[in-house]
Image (cartoon, helix red, strand yellow):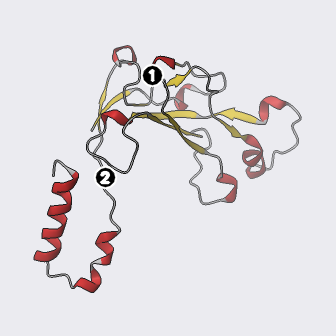
Amino acid sequence: PATLAAAEQFAEETIISAKIPREHRSFFDKLFPSIRIHNESESATSMPLGASRYGGLPDLPTDWQWPERDRYAVALRHRQVGSNDPRHLYAPMSFLAQINLAELPDPLSLPSRGWLYFFYDLEESPNGTLLLDVGSCRVLYYDGDPSCLRLRQYPEGIDDFDRPSPHSLAF
């Protein structure tokens, strides 16, 4: 279905036609609206500033620092604690995606403007099952002036294989 209202109508009709007893329908009340994301390989230079994308380089506000991960947890995991070099205490995270919320279809309980940015520790690729995995990803929200966005280069310390190739996104 093309709209949220059409999807809700379709779900209600499906539930009724399947003759699901009313007491078992509470499961369907917990379903959340979702969107389908389509991507295409594209040159990073052809993506407009602020456009939704997976991989490549982010368009971050000028006053933002690149997200970093506390490496102490990583050192603990590998039992390598002991370095006094401050460069080993924090490491930049890989950029995964930016979503321009104005490009999304119908309301999804998200703001209608601004950007979501997704960063992750691709080098370690923790799965989130350990307490040491805390801080291995970041989701950031910016709703400020689009003229403050700048294409940001990767900081030192992120290997090429931890830099996903750019893809434009459509919803």
Q: SS at mark 2?
A: loop
Tell me: 28 left or right of 66: left
- Of 81 and 9, nearer the camera is 9
The residue at the far left in this view is 17
State the image coordinates of residue 60 (x, y, percent, origin top left): 52, 24
Q: Amino acid at mark 1?
A: Pro
Res. 51 image quadrant? top left
Separation of marks 1 and 2 at Cα, in angstroms: 26 Å
Quadrant for the C terminus, please: top left
Q: Few, some or many C-alpha atoms within 10 Å of disc 1 (few <14, some 14-19, many ≥20)? A: some
Query: In front: mark 1 or mark 2?
Result: 1
State the image coordinates of residue 81 (x, y, percent, origin top left): 84, 45
| Count of all numbered marks drawn on residues in the image | 2
State the image coordinates of residue 26 (x, y, percent, origin top left): 32, 77
State the image coordinates of residue 73 (x, y, percent, origin top left): 74, 48
Q: Is residue 92 visible?
A: yes
Tell me: 29 left or right of 111: left
Q: SS at mark 1?
A: helix
The residue pinned by badge 2 equals 34
User: Which circle marks residue 45 in the picture?
Assistant: none
User: Which circle marks residue 146 in the picture?
Assistant: 1
Q: Residue at x 45, y 22 (%)?
A: 146
In this rendering, the answer to whether 16 lies above or below 168 is below
Res. 115 image quadrant? top left
Q: Residue at x 55, y 18 (%)?
A: 153
In this rendering, the answer to whether 104 lies above or below 49 is below
